[in-house]
Amino acid sequence: MVLNEDDLRNEIESFAKRETDVIESEDFQDFKDEILPNHFNYYEKACNFCGNLITIKADPKKRQKLVESLETCHLNTTPEGVSAFAILFPMAFMITFIIISFLVSTFLMGGESTMFFIIVSVFSGVMLIIPLSSFPGLLANNWRLKASNQMVMSVFYIVSYMRHTSNLELAIKFTSDHISPPLSIDFKKLMWNVETSKYDSMKQSIDIYLEGWKKYNMEFVEVMHLVESSLYESTDKKRLNTLEKALSLILESTYEKMLHFAQNLKSPITMLHMMGVILPILGLVILPLVVSFMDGIFWYHISVLYNIFLPAGVWYLGKSILSTRPNGYGQADITELNPELKKHRDVDIKFFGFEKSVKPKYISMAIIAVFFLIGFSPLITYSILEMQGTNWDMIFDDVLEDGIVFTTDNEVITNAKFSFLGYRENDKGVVVGPYGLGSTLISIALPLGLGLGLSYYYDSKTKKLMLIRTKTKELEGEFAAALFQLGNRVGDGLPAEIAFEKVSEVMENTPSGRFFDMVTNNIATLGMGVEEAIFHKKYGALTKFPSALIESSMKVFVESAKKGPDVAAQSLINISTYIKEMHRVDERLKDLMAEITGSMTSQINFLAPLISGIVIGLTSMITTILNTLGNQLSGFQAQPGGAGSQPSGGGLLDLFGDSIPTYYFQAVVGIYIVQITFLLTQMLNTIQNGYDPLNEDYMLGQYLKKSVTKYCIIAFVIILLFNMIAGSVISNLKVGGMV
């Protein structure tokens, strides 16, 4: 149909007056700087700085991949800057740690193992070059993982909006306002590219953006093309069918890909369990024997292996496994939806009428400091005694008249069955230890303090927020039924204000009923309109139920209500159907992952602390027996005629070096338990829930407390029990009478 001049003028004027069709995006660069994680900005600045210092050409084979990764993460740097940073940072790392190693070794360790620390520093620096050269690729994979978690919701928002307003630009804007980063940043960039005339149309901007997803999520590409094609359908019925097909396709593909992911996850998880838990911990059974028969191995050698290289290997393997996770669902941090909720992260302390909000991290730091002080008390006590020129110790031995004695006699301390500190002089006249049972038991305070401190921090900052989320999830679970009722009431011709009241009465004492009741009260008592009653920043119903799903559903309702009650009613009924379908798929996905997540949960909460505690007990027993054998052989050799009559005694004695005290073994393994629990919990959350930072912090608070506490209790009991067995074995050893 050809419009005449007057009709054309009226059409243009009508379009100009449509305020809802105006896209008012903020400056994209400012938005990006505000929303991107700090490490992105730091990395971007570091690469640009290094790129200005030296010019290192990137590998031509990898350059294009680096460019794609940088564009994916919206990092404003170059492959040459990445290459320069990958060289300069490891060099600075090596130089810094070589200097620190030299100073520590010289002034604190008497020049001991200087070369070892230098080698570790150089090796670590060289190994950093490889991951840093491809670090943008890792950032891009994480970006895609987080973005893919929002794809289902993004399609839901686009389809919901375009059902009543067939405008792709406005649908993209609406979606970008209601999904979480990083996909929201991508959608903001789509609008920014059009507004800055980089591309001629939104379709062109979207098509070029989708090119980057073809290798990683073809289903999302197909879905977005379906959404675009709905704009060109000849009838409204065909347009709606196309939109419904787009949403169904993303839901079905999500389920199928998660099914394959769950099936292929068993072998990697088993390998991760063996590498991260079983083999490292069981290796401790052999280490005391190896150390006792080999000179030059100290506790910090084991610490470098267990507390640096092994966690790094587990982290890398975990990231590799998670990089294959397909798109699913993710939960936004509710504090992003309502910044006022950030105050719930603080801990309220009440004391004699005095009340103050304290950051959880300060309380956690205090807990860690106290337990660390207890754990290091044997070392502190020895340092004080050494300055006083004495070797004081508390001896436990059933052959003593009093059972417990305090002594400074080195011979008594060396030959005691059990001691508190257990420092002694070796055959070279060097004081070694602490080998005492008391020191070993007290060392458990190190992992206990670290674990409980971190647990308290995460638990405190998420406890109140998780209660709010739980209520919100309850509302989301039944919101589909509430929307269906609301849609029917509006469809019957009732005004929205009355429709909300009627639904709140029917669903009384339910989360949906309370939500609708808040809307009704705001309208009746505060004189608000429906939109303000829902979205008011201070009094709106969403302040008590921060949910992106509910917020967007209400936004769609408000926008569709402007087009008439029939459109609004149909929109609500369709949204209700979509929500039910998404919940159905979500529950099926949880069933798929139940076996894997259950296995990982048992590893974190039971197997790792149990095996570790038992192995530490065995290590303590072996170390005690070997030390006693070494001491008795030394005494036997020192007896008159001992060396002469037993010329082989010296050779046998040479087999026994100074074993590493169980004190250090336990500290290293205890800290490793904290590390492995942290890493496995993060991985478990991502497998189960996708990118969900709030739930991750909550799980860390719960799992760290359970795992570390179980380990400490088991280790304490087993160490005590096995040392009693070792004491019985030692009582029966009569090396001096050996022939």
Image: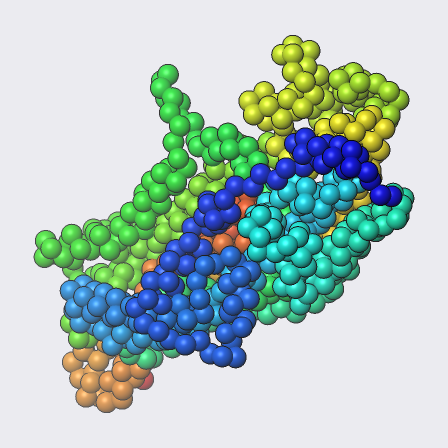
Res. 643 image quadrant? bottom left
In the figure, 381 relative to 273: above or below?
above
Quadrant in the picture for the N terminus = top right
Q: Residue at x 69, y 62 (%)?
A: 217
Q: Which residue is at the front of the view, 701 or 123?
A: 123
- Indicate left or right for 83 with 148 as reference: left
Image point (79%, 29%), residue name? 563
The image shows residue 596 at horizontal and vertical percentages of: 67, 58
Q: Can residue 276 be seen?
A: no
Could you say which is closer to the camera, residue 163 or residue 334?
A: 163
Q: Residue 556 placed where, x, y %?
A: 73, 34
Residue 532 position, x and y percent, is: 64, 22
Looking at the image, residue 234 sits to the left or right of residue 104; the answer is right
Q: Residue 96: name its quadrant.
A: bottom left
Horizontal side of 338 relative to 569 (left or right) equals left
Q: Up-down: is 493 above or below 675?
A: above
The C terminus, quarter of image? bottom left
